[in-house]
Image: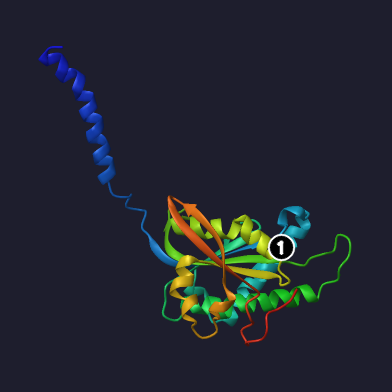
């Protein structure tokens, strides 16, 4: 192979390698900017087994209870983004404000939601086709969230939803006496739960699952039926 042919042969290889390096250095699109959010997502147990009219009722109830739980905890609309519908659940993104520390979700919002849920279930008349009782899984995480105008996305949300939807979380609720189980990420456990801030009992949380998201290992912790905002014993469904 002469010198001229060698140059023609090597040029495409060099060009491709250079292009790859350029792509690796290319910054994210200008419209994609991470915003730190506390993440709370909920999912209704057994929604797929209900008829569409019942699903509609459960969805309405869930949104009503969520709104009341956040309101009672003092988290107003200005503190959070609009609820994001997930079909059989919802996503809430809370803005990082001094008035809304993560502890407020753990010792006020979730316990109040559990209390409201137990009250709702207790007041229902049971019977074939008339069971409107609701049991839910809740996850709390935090991290950078992206938005492109079509919705929110990002690794932090991937972690939250994987914890919320993992078989271990579903099994935990299925075997729980209470109508709610809370799953927290490793980040939330290490930065909040284990320190035992007021209203948070670290001893009530137990390791639930280890899962991998984008090549990183993440651990989830679970507790059944957090005590109510008034400090009562755990609710039993």
Q: Residue furthest right?
A: 128
Instruction: Pick the quarter of the image with the C terminus.
Output: bottom right
Answer with left or right where residue 202 lies relative to residue 19: right
Instruction: Pick the quarter of the image with the N terminus.
Output: top left
Res. 67 image quadrant: bottom right
How many numbered markers are drawn?
A: 1
| Residue 16 x/y as whole percent | 26, 30
Q: What residue does disc 1 label?
A: 174
Q: Mark 1 Cα within 10 Å, few/some/many (few <14, many 20+)?
A: some
Can residue 66 be seen by looking at this rendering? yes
- Residue at x 27%, y 37% (from the top left corner): 20
Answer with left or right where residue 24 lies relative to residue 78: left
Depth check: 115 or 99 in front? 115
Depth check: 44 or 5 in front? 5
- Residue at x 77%, y 67% (from the top left corner): 133
| Residue 72 x/y as whole percent | 59, 82
Can residue 151 be seen by looking at this rendering? no
- Residue at x 70%, y 78% (from the top left corner): 235
Depth check: 209 or 160 in front? 209
Q: Residue furthest left?
A: 3
Q: How is the image coloured?
A: rainbow
| Residue 36 x/y as whole percent | 40, 66
Question: In the displayed structure, would residue 89 be above or below residue 188?
Answer: above
Res. 7 image quadrant: top left
| Residue 137 x/y as whole percent | 64, 65
- Element class at badge 1: helix
Q: Residue furthest top?
A: 1
């Amino acid at each position: 192979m002469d010198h001229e042919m060698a140059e023609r042969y090597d040029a495409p290889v060099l060009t491709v390698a250079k292009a790859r390096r350029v792509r690796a250095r290319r910054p994210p699109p200008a419209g994609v900017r991470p915003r730190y959010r506390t993440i709370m997502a909920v999912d209704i147990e057994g929604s797929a087994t209900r008829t569409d009219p019942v699903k509609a009722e459960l969805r309405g109830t869930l949104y009503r209870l969520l709104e009341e739980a956040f309101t009672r905890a003092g988290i107003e609309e200005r503190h959070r983004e609009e609820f994001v519908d997930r079909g059989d659940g919802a996503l809430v993104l809370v803005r990082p404000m001094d008035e809304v520390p993560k502890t407020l979700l753990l010792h006020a919002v979730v316990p109040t939601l559990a209390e409201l849920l137990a009250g709702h279930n207790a007041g229902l008349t049971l019977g074939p086709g008339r069971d409107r009782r609701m049991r839910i899984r809740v996850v709390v995480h935090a991290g950078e969230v992206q938005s492109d105008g079509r919705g929110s996305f990002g690794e932090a949300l991937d972690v939250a939803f994987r914890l919320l939807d993992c078989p271990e979380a579903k099994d935990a609720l299925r075997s729980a006496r209470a109508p709610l189980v809370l799953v927290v990420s490793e980040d939330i456990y290490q930065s909040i739960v284990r320190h035992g801030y007021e209203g948070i009992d670290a001893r009530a949380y137990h390791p639930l699952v280890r899962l991998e998201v984008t090549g990183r290992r993440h651990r989830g912790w679970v507790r059944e039926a957090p005590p109510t905002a008034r400090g009562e014993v755990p609710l039993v469904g």
